[in-house]
Amino acid sequence: MSVAKMDENRKVTTHRLFEMKQRGEKISMLTAYDYSMAAIIDQAGMDVILVGDSASNVMAGNVTTLPITLDQMIYHGKSVMKAVKRSLVVVDLPFGTYQGNSKEALSSAIRVMKETHADCIKLEGGAEVKESIERILCAGIPIMGHLGLTPQSINKFGTYTVRAREEAEAEKLVRDAHLLEEIGCFAIVLEKIPAVLATRVARELTIPVIGIGAGGGVDGQVLVMHDMLGINKEFSPRFLRRYANLNEMITKAVQSYIADVKSRDFPNEKEQY
Ligand code: KIV
């Protein structure tokens, strides 16, 4: 096996992401919530799989990410981990499991790590959750931060529009990004902020900055799997590129099956015992 091939198959670690940033190699990240899709995404060569709390929307049908529980995130994390051999797996800490106090945050993070066997966790916020982050890091659990449009705070924002357009919010975001790096987060997600601001943060930080709706000047990109595969027809923000139209493909396949059952075409003689 060639050295390049061996490298492709090597497990992705937080340290490897850091090396990728240093050599200017972009990081690919996509969400997954179940065994079968995680297996496909891992084998396709994804660097990072995020078991996002967007599971609350795309798997459970909730309007926001707020209702999903720690038990539900652990269920999704376990399913994904059974499939993944190479990608780094990050599991989101859900709303209400780390903001209250650092002790609760640590016990939530420990449950995720012990029960799912994931590589690390992600949580939203900057200075407000500093103590929680420090305590989790003390236990040796790597943390990916998340700034900008943080969906767990949607009730405070009141809208899913672009964040940090105003100078005060932009400056706080830059301060928070530096803080997350200083206290030891291994990477940060920046969601739905101006590209110029995201590029500045990526240049100023040594840790990888992964964007969603944050332009091309960051160190990597993340999308929600259901959105980029076109499963979800309604959601079409400007930043989304659709790589498939699975909604249409699945609808056609299901309709063909219904028609074949009704017309007695399925099963035929070769499809029975
Ligand atoms: O939960 C999620 O899918 C996320 C991404 C949007 C980054 O946090």
Image (cartoon, helix red, strand yellow):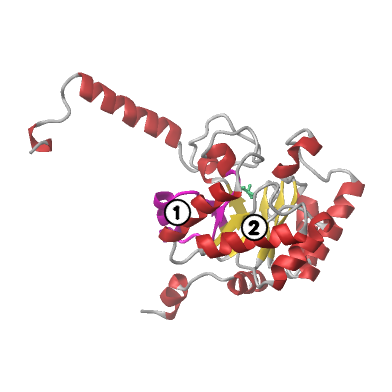
Lateral position of residue 230 relative to residue 2, left or right? right
Residue 267: image tag: none
Q: Residue 82 at x, y = what percent?
A: 42, 59
- Give the structural element (helix, strand or loop) at label 1: helix
Residue at image x 48%, y 36%? Answer: 231
Residue 104 can be seen, yes or no: yes
Residue 128 figure quarter: bottom right
- Give the structural element (helix, strand or loop) at label 2: helix
* Placement of 260 over or under 241, stated as above or below: above
Q: Nearer the viewer, residue 16 or 127?
A: 127
Q: Residue 51 at x, y = what percent?
A: 55, 52
* Placement of 114 over or under 235, stated as above or below: below
Q: Is residue 120 magenta?
A: no
Q: Residue 43 at x, y = what percent?
A: 41, 60
- Residue position marked by numbered label 1 in the rendering: 79
Question: Callout 1, which amino acid?
Answer: Ser
Q: Nearer the viewer, residue 24 or 158?
A: 158
Residue at image x 75%, y 42%? Answer: 153
Q: Which quadrant is home to the C terminus?
A: top left
Please give the range of residues in magenta: 29-54
**Spatial separation of the CA atoms under disc 2 and disc 1:** 18 Å
Q: Is residue 42 magenta?
A: yes
- Residue position marked by numbered label 2 in the rendering: 108
Question: Callout 2, which amino acid?
Answer: Ser
Lateral position of residue 79 relative to residue 63, left or right? left
Q: Nearer the viewer, residue 164 or 159?
A: 159
- Between disc 2 and disc 1, whose residue precedes? 1
Query: Dot 2, how many residues are within 10 Å of its Cα: few (below 14), some (14-19), or many (20+)?
Result: some
Residue at image x 44%, y 32%? Answer: 247
